[in-house]
Image (cartoon, coloured by chain):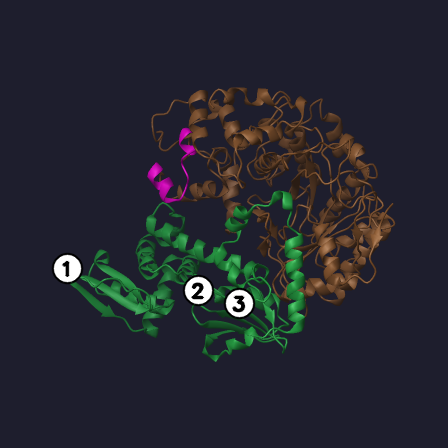
Chain colours: A brown, B green
Amino acid sequence: MSIVIQENMTVQKKLEVLSDAAKYDVACTSSGVDRTNSGTGNSGIGNSLACGICHTFSADGRCISLLKILLTNECIFDCKYCMNRASNDVLRATFTPEEICGLTIEFYRRNYIEGLFLSSGVLKSPDFTMELMLRTLRMLREEYQFNGYIHCKAVPGADPVLVEMAGWYADRMSVNLELPTADSLRQLAPNKTRKNILRPMKQIQIGRMENRGKPAFNRIPLMEEDGYREQGFTKLEQEASGDRGNTGSLILPHETARNVRIGQGTANTLIAEDLQEIAEASSRKTSFGMIKAPSINRGFVPAGQSTQMIIGATPESDYQIISVAEALYQKFDLKRVFYSAYISINEDSSLPALNQGPPLLREHRLYQADWLLRFYGFRATELLSENRPNFNILMDPKCNWAIGHLEQFPIEVNKADYYTLLRVPGIGVKSAQRIVKARKTAILSFEDLKKMGIVLKRAIYFITCNGRMMYPVKIEENYITSMLLRVKEKLPFDMEAASAYKQLSLFDDVKFASANAQIGSFI
Amino acid sequence: MTMKKVYFCENSLEGIFSAIYDAWSDRNGHANNEIRLLAGEDQGNMELFTEYIYVKNSEEKISKVARSVYEKISNEAYELICGASCSCEASRGDDIYRFLIVGFSMGKGVIDCLHNKYVMKIFELNRNVSNEAHHLKGFLRFQEMEEGILISKIAPKNDIIRLLAPHFSDRLSQENFVIYDENRDTAIIHQKAKQWFYTGGEFLDTDKIKKITEKEESIGSMWKAFFSSISIKERENKELQRNNLPLRFRSNMPEFKSSGQE
């Protein structure tokens, strides 16, 4: 193990090293918990808003909400893709808990940040590292009386007691899945095992359930991450989900929806084994059971847990990836699954050589699909299949789905329930909510929809108002596909479809051509 | 022929309510009335065959309009009106007037009536105001003065510092801080463990902000170091950064100032 340790490093230098080392962590959200300072004694500093707050945006366009740092970048693990792996010759640094608390408070007072995101390399052992992280969190909460947001990683392999204790001080915890399948994990992260990752995840889930006295899957649609804070949605939601048996959703709060989902297996032979492992992760209580809540009880991981996986370093298909994500949402009640386009940092024979940059379009499609799973009531098996294992580069997953299910369209805007409206290309959560609200007082026309700010350029091929379509449109696959492709999709980055295509076909076995065979004839 | 009437009023919710009361009670026909704000900005062209009326604030008129909104429409409608009155849109006075015309005829159902353009307009003004307030909850920056007082200078389009005040007063309840709106020359002042208040900026010695302490400089420089090292070179995307963080906010954010420029 080669480690360069520089003595007497300044805090600023440490910050540079340990934020640089933390930058590949995807999540920087500060969402999921509403807490006032006055409600926690009012003698401390900080509060938290469920919608989350972005404090600035870095040059890569990503939100900076939290002071995202590693406690240390010294690491005994040798994960092939990681900058801080033991075999790399990089400058190493370690913060003291005092330094982290001081930085967090000074940054927070100036409104630079919403709180702390604390991750770490594995120093000496998982337990040793987790203990240091715990000490930092406890100091920040108890001595500095910090009521702002804290996101803390659980180190795989750390003692469950330490994880449980950290859970009382953190708002969100995350355990990185790292790679979509256990096989890939074995190849690229030889010191980590799927079991060591899933165990703390399950522990945190159960801890949260016990703390809240509520069953899992009790999720409210239009969640905080969406930033949509309109009151009274619950009512709408109930109305909308009234007769919904056929497409139960992850986010339906009702027990019925839950049963519907569990009945429908998502597994297929390709990924069955892997999902099985997720499904079977021990649901026994893994905590020590003797840890009591701190005197100021902010709840056990009140903002829930998230995870992330690297996309494009290993040959999994999009179908495998979203099936894994879906299983995680269902079986672990995760708040978010983050996808991180693989960036080539180390050279290694087991890693793909990337000469065209990270696969950003693929990552974008996965996030779009993830949104459909979480907010729109879609299932992974509706979006992709073993025969069509990858997303269409030319079209977002919802358009792609709609084109394949034209028999379900057009739908009547004045009658269709909330979840059916959400399935219309171009109609998102906000638009569907507005429609459900507005049609209480009027029968809506296309003119009304426009006034309500609903974008119709994609939707017009799929809806009727009062039994009529806006223009006479044939509901025919080729025609609608070509019309949809004329609407320029707004991507968060500048990219030509051709180069995107190359990006996505990194691996020869993804059967990419079949996914796009039909589309191909239009370009 | 009925004459068009334009009611000029003070640029505040009180002014707008006073004007709405007068416009309503003189039975000229709503279509012939217009409410405009007396706000240093463009007051519109004078037109022929138009009567211009300058409305003075009246406690009685204000409370009558406010009560009617509560009783005949709803609390929620009242909040929407308050939000709209913070907007920078020049037509906000008349927009509120039009909204109330629909509101008083429909009652509390008006807020569902999103296909009505006057109702939609009020929602748009609110969205705009609350979006900016939400942005500034994140983009606002404090700087610590020698006495430990935190000072923030912002230049919002809409009049939102009073919307920010409760948030920061809770968050930083143990701090002395000032949030100064340089566009309107108004400020929020919060003293440790006390209630915040709203005041004109003429009381503030804003020159003091320019003095930077050594501690402030060192923390600012750590923040800048963090800001640059957290970005991933392979994903650089200035356009996305600009979409998420419009340039107009950056003048008061230290991470976008080169050193020595402060």
Q: Residues within 10 Å of mark 3 (few under 14, many from 20)?
A: many
Discs 1/3, front: 3
Magenta residue span? A445-461
Q: Is residue A288 visible?
A: no
Q: Secondary structure at mark 2?
A: loop
Quarter of the figure with residue B10: bottom left
- The residue drawn where x is 32% and y is 70% is B61
Residue type highlighted by circle 1 = Thr
Subunit that carries the residue with mark 3: B
* Residue A30 in the image, given as x and y percentages of width and height: 63, 53
Q: Nearer the viewer, residue B165 or B40?
A: B40
Badge 1: residue crowd in 10 Å (few <14, some 14–19, many ≥20) = few
Q: Are marks 2 and 3 in contact (CB under 8 Å)?
A: no
Residue A239 in the figure: left or right of residue B40: right
Question: Residue A458 location in percent, x, y?
Answer: 43, 33
Q: How many marks?
A: 3
Q: Which residue is mark 1?
A: B2
Quarter of image, res A442: top left
Badge 2 local density, few (<14 within 10 Å), some, or many (20+)?
Answer: many
Residue extending furthest toward the front: B260
Left/right of residue B135 with respect to residue B21 in the rendered view: right
The chain under label 1 reads B
> In this figure, which residue is indicated by the disc labeled 3?
B165
Give me the C-alpha separation between circle 1 and circle 3. 46 Å
Mark pair 2, 3: CA separation: 12 Å
Q: Which residue is mark 2?
A: B159
Report whether residue A270 is seen.
yes
